[in-house]
Image (cartoon, helix red, strand yellow):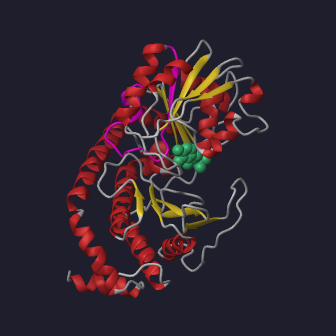
Amino acid sequence: MEQNVITGMYETLGISQKVLDFAADIEEQLKPRFQEIDERAEYNQLKVIHAMQECRVSDVHFSATTGYGYNDLGRDTLEEVYSRVFHTESALVRPQLMSGTHALHIALSGNLRPGDELLSPAGKPYDTLEEVIGIRDSAGSLKEYGVSYRQVDLLPDGAFDYDNIAKAINDKTKLVTIQRSKGYDPRPTFSVRQIGELIAFVKRIKPEVICMVDNCYGEFVETIEPTDAGADMIVGSLIKNPGGGLAPIGGYIAGRKDCVDRASYRLSAPGLGKEVGASLGLNQPLYQGLFLSPTVVAGALKGAVFAANIYERLGYGVVPNGSESRHDIIQAITFGSPEGVISFCKGIQAAAPVDSFVTPEPWDMPGYDSPVIMAAGAFVQGSSIELSADGPIKPPYAVYFQGGLTWYHAKLGILKSLQQLVDDGVVSL
Ligand SMILES: *Cc1c(COP(=O)(O)O)cnc(C)c1O
């Protein structure tokens, strides 16, 4: 196909020649990076297919159960597929795990008992966990159940503070929680290898400690997962990476059988565990989403790398930077002004297949100390494996951008964001 046919389509979608030329140059230079991303996706695709073949996945697994959901073959086999992909003894993969926060809450509260201590050796965990743990007082928190919490902050350069981690581990330390992704913090995301080193260090001091990794946004970014590097349990959301954009709800906990079993007794009831929980016809999109996940993650990663390079070239601060290796799908861009954040989010919204006609505005979201603007035109509410961006309207005026079910959509979103910044007079090319 002639190049100008595609160019014409971009023009139809409101992208100027100037923006296209600027981006084309950058895309050309990213070819080797994109090839690396494709190779990892190829490996991960094969890994998922192999697991499905080993489990003899068949169309009988896609039928719905209702009520108690006893003997739900599709559910049980999906959990075996997850176990094989993540190389674990067991997994809990359920629509009844309502979000990433819920899955983390179940994993923690299922495995901690009154008098135990939880340790975060990698700084403050994700915002929503503050209330789960009781860092911010909250009804039903682990703190209310007599579980204490200790945290060791990262060193100023983002490295683990091994001396203080060693000092923080004590008789009560039962579970160590490590968040792989930076989430919405400015720190770097940890590689699986770094996480493995931290786990090995903790286990040398206290071998029986349960090491749990919050794997949100990290699945299939590398060819290994934290469970390949010593983690006893990994936890994530199905409306992020492993749901591949098709899972309409759900979360997973994969790991050592005793850890997953204890989580299952918390999710359902002591004595019931994994035996109950009807899949209600959701098995098929959960399987198919996992099948698509490696390529969907690759598209999102290309989008993140492309955005980093575009905005780095324009002189904005980007984390990760345009050339460093990636360990999650999140890209932070610091605009330094409210206008930059707002224009960027408007552009992302305008590129969406759903709700492209609405204009995002900053609003006072519960739980945040400044107005927040969000762009999301998603098929699944709140899904952040779909192209989405959000930014608090406060210094340093950064947006966090992630997802894109296809590279082409992620690319359009970034071109639209740049076009909006140009049209609003924030950027001149
Ligand atoms: C998204 C996320 C969570 C919470 O997941 P929700 O589905 O939004 O509840 C927890 N930890 C990290 C690192 C995340 O990115």
Position in image of residue 393 (x %, y %): 61, 65
Please say whether residue 398 is visible from this viewpoint: yes
Q: Is residue 220 magenta?
A: yes
Name the residue: 41% across, 70% down: 414
Question: Vertical placement of 338 versus 396: above or below?
Answer: below
Position in image of residue 263 (x %, y %): 61, 28
Name the residue: 77% across, 34% down: 140
Q: Disc count in the image? A: 0
Question: Vertical placement of 349 versus 216: above or below?
Answer: below
Span of residues in magenta: 207-230
Tell me if 400 is positioned left or right of 271 in this view. Answer: left
State which quadrant residue 27 falls in. bottom left
120 or 162, which is in the foreground? 162
User: Where does the C terminus fall, quadrant-wise?
Assistant: bottom left
Q: Is residue 1 magenta?
A: no
94 or 127, which is in the foreground? 127
166 or 206, which is in the foreground? 166
Position in image of residue 168 (x %, y %): 56, 21
Q: Residue furthest front?
A: 156
Tell me if 182 is positioned left or right of 27 in this view. Answer: right
Name the residue: 57% across, 74% down: 355
State which quadrant residue 361 falls in. bottom right
User: Where does the N terminus fall, quadrant-wise?
Assistant: bottom left
Position in image of residue 229 (x %, y %): 37, 28
Please say whether residue 250 is visible from this viewpoint: no
Q: Main secondary structure of the magenta part?
A: loop
